[in-house]
Amino acid sequence: MLRRSTTTFLVQTLSTPSTKATPSSTMRFFSPLAILSFTPATASAWSIVAPRSLYRHSTTRIVPATVLNGYSTAIVGEKSTESFRLSFTGEGDSTISPWHDIPLRSATEGTYNAVIEIPKMTKAKMEVATKEPNNPIAQDIKKGKLRDYHGPIFWNYGCLPQTWEDPNEEHPELKCFGDNDPIDVVEIGSKALPMGTVVEVKPLGVLAMIDDGELDWKEYNDIDDVPAAVKDGIREWFRWYKTPDDKPLNGFGFDEKWLDAKEAGAVIEETHEAWKKLRSGKAEAGKLWTGKE
């Protein structure tokens, strides 16, 4: 049984890109230059390519789920509109899913790839569209309106690919179910990472946030290394961020404590196993797009 249902992880990048986002970019996964460093890599991991269409269809998905050497992104539609999509393309110009095709594990042992959905100091609630073909990044919509935070988020926010918080599994202690999404990631480096960046991160700790009755895990080397002001600030942001919409305060499991890196790793592995069941058809997908006919 999945021990952790819905999760946000506190992570630190091992290296970061040094250029700003462009409507179409080619990226390589980043090799670690300074473990536990907030300093971005001095060499750029980006190069510009010609724009590609989001709605490119391919009958053969040529990128294995465990190996992906490079990818490009393309934007269609205008920002702050329902039509905006940021899509991903792999080798051979095949459209790929940032959720299913980007590998979970990165090049260095104990590290993972994180897909950045919401850059630091922005407000638009962007996310991998789990129910759309190829899962592009889009702005979330609720009650017919595009969602924005009421103030900027103070870190980079994203998800871990090839993970899934199973809504059918109840946490044995907290009695909450997964939220049907990949695991959330809070990246605490000093630089804002462009939307669509795939960055190598090291998990530091994990926080069990209970959001609308669903368990939502949030992820420093170990959690005791993180200043208390940082941990408290992240927790309080997630406690209060929905109240301007007349929603109640979010709660947290485990006496509101951050769990350590070991527990974070266990959560990641469990949700990775849940994702494998989802992809194989052993778990009910519902309306989720999994790339399987």
Image (cartoon, helix red, strand yellow):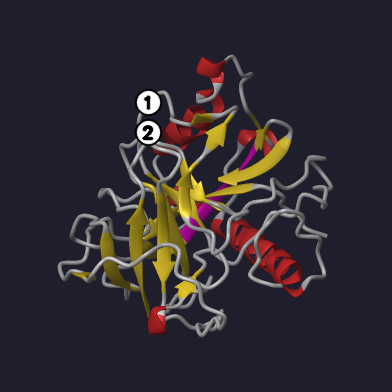
- Residue placed under numbered mark 1 in the picture: 151
Residue 7's place in the image compared with 61, above or below, is above
Give the residue at mark 2: 123
Residue 205, percent from left and from top: 53, 52
Q: Earlier in the sequence, mark 1 or mark 2?
A: 2
Element under disc 1: loop
Rendered residue at 53%/73% (across/down):
101
Task: Name the residue: 49% across, 83% down.
Answer: 67
Picture coordinates of residue 192, whole percent (x, y): 27, 48
* Magenta stretch: helix, strand or loop mostly: strand
- In the rendered image, residue 202, in percent from the top left (x then y), is placed at 44, 63
Task: Please indicate whether residue 4 sits to the left or right of residue 157 in the image.
Answer: right
Q: Which residues are magenta?
A: 203-209
Is residue 44 on the magenta stretch? no
Question: For residue 45, what is the image quadrant?
Answer: bottom left
Residue type at mark 1?
A: Gly
Q: Residue at x 45, y 69 (%)?
A: 56
Q: Quadrant of the N terminus?
A: bottom right
- Res. 134 image quadrant: bottom right
